[in-house]
Amino acid sequence: MSAATPYALELRDLRKSFGKTEIIRGANLAVQAGERVAIIGPNGAGKSTLFNLISGRFAPTSGDVLLHGQSINGKEPYEINRLGLSRSFQITNIFPKLSVFENLRCGVLWSMGYRYTFLRFLSRMDAVNERAKQLMEQIGLQKKRDELAVNLTYAEQRALEIGITIAGGADVILLDEPTAGMSNSETRRFIQLIREVTEGKTLLTVEHDMGVVFGLADKIAVVVYGEVIAFDTPENVRANARVQEAYLGSAVADEQAALH
Amino acid sequence: MTLEFFTISLLNGVSYGLLLFMLSSGLTLIFSMMGVLNFAHTSFYMLGAYFGYMLSGVIGFWPALLIAPLLVGVLGAVFERYSLRKVHKYGHVPELLVTFGLSYLILEVVQLVWGRSAVPYALPAALQGPLFTLYGTQFPKSRSFIMLLALLMLLAVWLVLTRTRIGLVIQAALKKPEMVEALGHNVPRVFMLVFGGGCALAGLAGVIGGNTYMTEPSMAMSVGSIIFVVVVVGGLGSLAGAFLASLLIGIVQTFAVALDYSWASLLNSMGMNLTPDSFGWPVLSLTISQMAPILPYLFLVLMLIFRPKGLMGTRED
Amino acid sequence: MSAILHPQIRNETMPVAGQAAMNVPDYYRFKPWNVGRVIVWGVFALLLIAAPHVFTSSLALTMLSQMGYAIIICLSYNILLGQGGMLSFGHAVYTGLGSFIAIHAMNRAAGGHLPIPVWLIPIVGGLAGMFFAALLGWVTTRKSGTTFAMITLGVGELVASMALMFPGFFGGEGGITTDRVYGPTFFGADFGPGIQVYYLIAFYCFVCTALMFAFTATPLGRMLNAVRDNPERVAFVGYSTQRVRYMGFIIAGFFAGIGGGLAAINFEIVTAMDSVSIIRSGTYLLFTFLGGATFFFGPIIGGVLLVLATVFLSEITKAWMLYLGLVFLFMVMYAPGGIAGLIMMNLRLAKYGKLGRIFGAYLALLGTGLAMVVGFAALVEMLYHLQLNSGLGSELRFMGTTLNVHSVDSWVGAGLIFLTGLGLFELVRRQYMRQWGEIQEEIEHDIQRRESV
């Protein structure tokens, strides 16, 4: 990657304080387009806060967040979304009283150029409906097309959430603990789904499941106490003494033992 | 503007503001704890006044000052237990609606029992007359009593919340109700207590407000909207904000009612010659006293434009 | 069970059992329903046209006219409440200001300054409502939830308090009056007679209802629903939540203004005390909710009930507001979907063929409920009579019999009927809830069975 092409997502000495407590203490990260990055770290390290900073829920106290080389500090979440970044949430965030199809359609509308218009009928927007149908099939929920989102099973709702996240065609996707609360088999299938739908996009996921992390990620970023203490390929991170000391430790040893 | 006018108006404004605070503090407590905005809060204020009136005639004012708020608090707790709790699972909007319905009902029942006109709820002998006379104008004992009561109440609530065990449980339940429940505390009962307590505070304000000002069926509505303005201007969920906003609005309104200046009078005194035929006369000729009723709401709108989270608002959803 | 608490929104693609199995392209899906839709709207139009010929008294005509624009107003309110999740305590501001602008426009037009015929005046009202909604709405929609509700209350009081400050516009205590008969006639109609006004109102009612229904099927309408369901997520599909709310607010204001304009034409007088008051806002809220905020047609029921209660019920009994408050309270607690919700829940039962089973329970509920209500009403009426009409003696007529407030018999009798009715009602209700639960489970099983086929 030449120096002229900006990183897809870059954090430069990012800091965030809530009152007197500094949660993010100088985080640095440079993610190239198309990379899949897993963000790991002990609880309370600030992973969700990082996501919230990147997605615009909070404004940084100092430092920069750059999306495709452009600073997005202090921008509203919807502005950031329009620049090509989308996220999912730890607690499922869908539209409960709308059907599966409607959920996805809402995700598609803006990206297809339909703004706040009230002079056109949704049913006549063939392109929108076609895309929503495509997404529905991609996430495997076409049988539940008209089911209200609140009535889906947990795993189905998580799948729907992923669907809405990618619906707008964003090229930088943030997934916050996508497999939380799933069984092993569900997790395996879900990871496969994530791999498929985020093909070619830049992906950042917060994950606790090490199997998922090592299976899905090109690179791992380890966040401890509001700083990124390591950002490298899984093998190198595994071998990194600082990381082992701070976090992986016995978990990695167990993983190794289980794999062999 | 004489010093006499200024001082008396200030005192009046502060006492009215403290009365507003007695009401808005209960509302803020209930809101902080349960996320419920009690639309019927000033209806409980009205009940306190009417109960105070009823009991004063039977057992005298001072015992009524104690018993009437308790009665109101019990009613509030009963409502929470049998009605509010049921709609809790539907969300905040139904909760607000159910308290709205309750305010409707209380108004009707009050009118049914006590009639539609004001009742002669009189001050007890000990509170009649002036506390002191300043520059020839009297400052009534009743208003000073309100100030005293409000401050005592604030102190008592603060002490209960920070020094007693139940107060700590309440504070904890404020932030993390599920955790507190997991620790073995009966959180629904705590909610019931807080709601009842908030209503009792409103009732207390009613007992003393009712005979200082007027006791009539419209008292709930007239002070109700001002209380909501106070709570939003002060910052939702902030007691300190509610205190500031109550005093601010109380003082400003008291002053405004007495001032007869208008833009027209100001401009005319500067040499312009505005007459009823001039352009914009209807707006320019409005005196401050004529505008007094809308000042709180004007505050609200301005606050929302320039500082939406209120004077001392906490980070809110 | 959760499906009861979250009824479906009427949208283009209402589900038909088994249709998922059919290989029908999605965007043709609404065609099979076209016939049904034509019938529904046709019946609606027919009802509007035929109503004054079925109910011919002049009282009925007054009520029908008022219902016409009450429907528009409640539907406009539901754009905020049911579709957008925005609880407003100040909707009367926009209907009222619409009325005032409309009536001033009528006076100007009658004086020859403004070439607007009467039948276009509602549009003027609508534009006024839209203007004020745009003006005040920007500040109002900055917040959501309970804060939004309180802001609408504050803004409502602001406008209501301003009424006395500007007597030129608001007409002071007496209000502004007008004469709706002016200018050229409309194909021979000068809109003097009540029946002509009714048909004007009915026309606007039909058109506005259709427009508001169409709105629900547009991107903005759908995103408004999304904002109601999950404002945070809306930002991450690219929409500004506040902007969506603001635009919804303006559109609601437009239709509210039309309703207000029609009211001005109907009564030929507008007073601030009545039209922009918080009480009126509360009335709109109450009846829209009662009719049912979760379905499109709910507010239509609400509008009809609004007129029936304020015009008719208020004549029959002085305690009507008490009854209203109680009904509202119980609705919020036990049937938050309103009357429309109740109807739809039972239609769902009918669709699966299970309505017959619970019919008996409904009859029993009705019987015991009636006894309970009659007993309660007797007690309340006697109380009211004691309080308000003591000058008229101790007797009052109640549903065909005479009650005596000073006789123990009346009180005990009424009390007994009430208590017995209450007790029996409670018993039947338990049975009913049990049956209802069973039926719901059966329906769930049915659905699952069909899905796995």
Image (cartoon, helix red, strand yellow):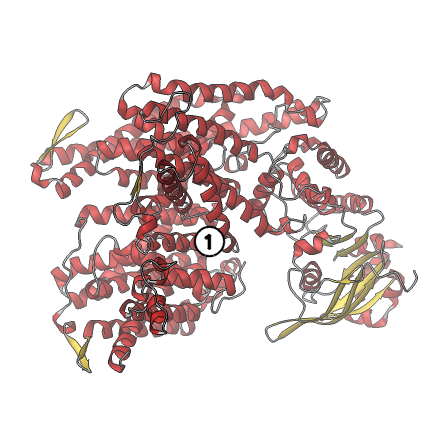
- Figure quadrant of residue B46: bottom left
Disc 1 secondary structure class: helix
Residue A243's spot in the image, x, y percent? 81, 69
Residue A191's spot in the image, x, y percent? 79, 47
The chain under label 1 reads C
Q: Which residue is mark 1?
A: C146
Q: Amino acid at mark 1?
A: Thr
Q: Residue A229: tell me if it is visible.
A: yes
Q: Residue furthest right?
A: A2
Q: Quadrant of the N terminus of chain A?
A: bottom right
Q: Is residue B77 left or right of residue C43?
A: left
Give me the residue at 43% from left, 71% from top.
B240
Q: Is residue C417 left or right of residue A71?
A: left
In the rendered image, the vertical position of residue C417 relative to residue C88, given as above or below: above
In the rendered image, the vertical position of residue A89 relative to residue B244, given as above or below: above
- Figure quadrant of residue A111: top right
In the rendered image, the vertical position of residue B185 relative to residue C280, given as above or below: below
Q: Residue C290: tell me if it is visible.
A: no
Residue B285's spot in the image, x, y percent? 33, 62
